[in-house]
Image (cartoon, helix red, strand yellow):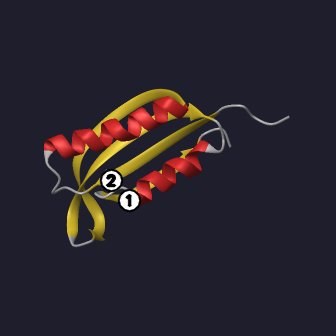
Amino acid sequence: MAKIQSRYETVFILNPNLTEEATAAAVEKFTALIGQNGTLGEVEDWGKRRLAYEINDFNEGYYTLVRFESAPDFPAELDRVYRITEGVMRSLIICLDE
């Protein structure tokens, strides 16, 4: 029997040079997308943090963690949106049910 919903956790790192408004808009865009395609859980704003290694000549990034439940096919779409959104330096989506 196929799973209808799975629990996920995603972290994305935004460019630190984005304005506060642009950063808030990007976080809102992703949380709205997750809310439309699943059940939005906890959203943790970690703020600017030092990166473990330099990415695109940046030593810092703006981190956000989001927990959610969705159908198993949605994380692939979310990953696609992360990749085409300007300002996203890195992202990671993990299934917590496995």
Is 62 left or right of 97, judged from the image as shown?
Answer: left
Which residue sits furthest right?
A: 1
Q: Are marks 2 and 1 in contact (CB under 8 Å)?
A: yes
Q: Position of residue 92 (x, y in %)?
A: 47, 53
Q: Position of residue 75 (x, y in %)?
A: 56, 46
Q: Secondary structure at mark 2?
A: strand
- Image quadrant containing the N terminus: top right
- Marked residue nearer the N-terminal end (2 or 1): 2
User: Which is nearer the eye, 4 or 11?
Assistant: 4
At horizontal 75% and vertical 34% (from top left) the residue drawn is 3
Q: Position of residue 53 (x, y in %)?
A: 30, 69
Give the crowd class for mark 2: few <14, some 14-19, many >=20 residues within 10 Å.
many
Residue 69 position (above or below residue 54): above
Q: Amino acid at mark 2?
A: Ile
Mark 1 highlights which residue?
Answer: 90
Mark 2 highlights which residue?
Answer: 13
Residue 60's image quarter? bottom left
- Image quadrant containing the C terminus: top right
Number of labels in the image equals 2
Q: Secondary structure at mark 1?
A: strand
The CA span between labels 2 and 1 is: 5 Å
User: Which is nearer the eye, 9 or 18?
Assistant: 18
At horizontal 65% and vertical 45% (from top left) the residue drawn is 73
